[in-house]
Image (tube, rainbow, N blue to C red):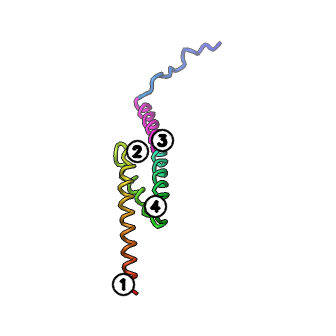
Amino acid sequence: MNTNYKTIKQVPTEFELENQSELRSVASAAQRAAQELEFERLKTKLLARELDEAATPELGLPLQRAASEAAALAWETLVPLLVFPALFEEKATLAMRRSHRQARIWAGSELVAV
């Protein structure tokens, strides 16, 4: 049997404050990653729905931009998953109006040029 067992240094059983904050930051990072994944799923789902309902394929890029703008704004809030759908709906509506208006202007300018 080892007779030097009394000289073994005791290891503290509680975490020091530094380690606790590190653990909190790791947990926080994991929660943020899960929230980002859920957010991307929501964004993809809503964008796919809008693209399916779009009347023309030319609306694809404006709708993608609308989704990106709404996502950027939503992440600035405390509840991005809650805010994003409404922001995206507003941005998508504006993008479709703008696209239709541009199409009318192009059609009108073609008639004038002929």
Pointer 2 residue: 81
Q: Is residue 13 magenta?
A: no
Query: Above or below — where is 14 with respect to 59?
Result: above
Q: CA distance from mark 3 to mark 4?
A: 30 Å
Figure quadrant of residue 31:
top left
Q: Is residue 26 magenta?
A: yes
Disc 4: CA contacts within 10 A as few (<14), some (14-19) or many (>=20): some
Give the label, 2 or 1, closer to the camera: 1
Q: CA distance from mark 4 to mark 2?
A: 23 Å
Q: CA distance from mark 1 to mark 3?
A: 54 Å
Q: Earlier in the sequence, mark 2 or mark 3?
A: 3
Specify few, some or many for label 1: CA neighbours under 10 Å numbering under 14, 14-19, or 20 or more. Answer: few
Q: Quadrant of residue 109?
A: bottom left
Which residue is label 1 attached to? 112
**Judging from the image, what secondary structure is the residue with disc 2 in?**
helix
Please tell me which of labels 3 and 4 falls first in the chain.
3
| Residue at which label 3 appears | 34
User: How dense is the environment of label 3, judged by Cα within 10 Å: few (below 14), some, or many (20 and up)?
Assistant: few
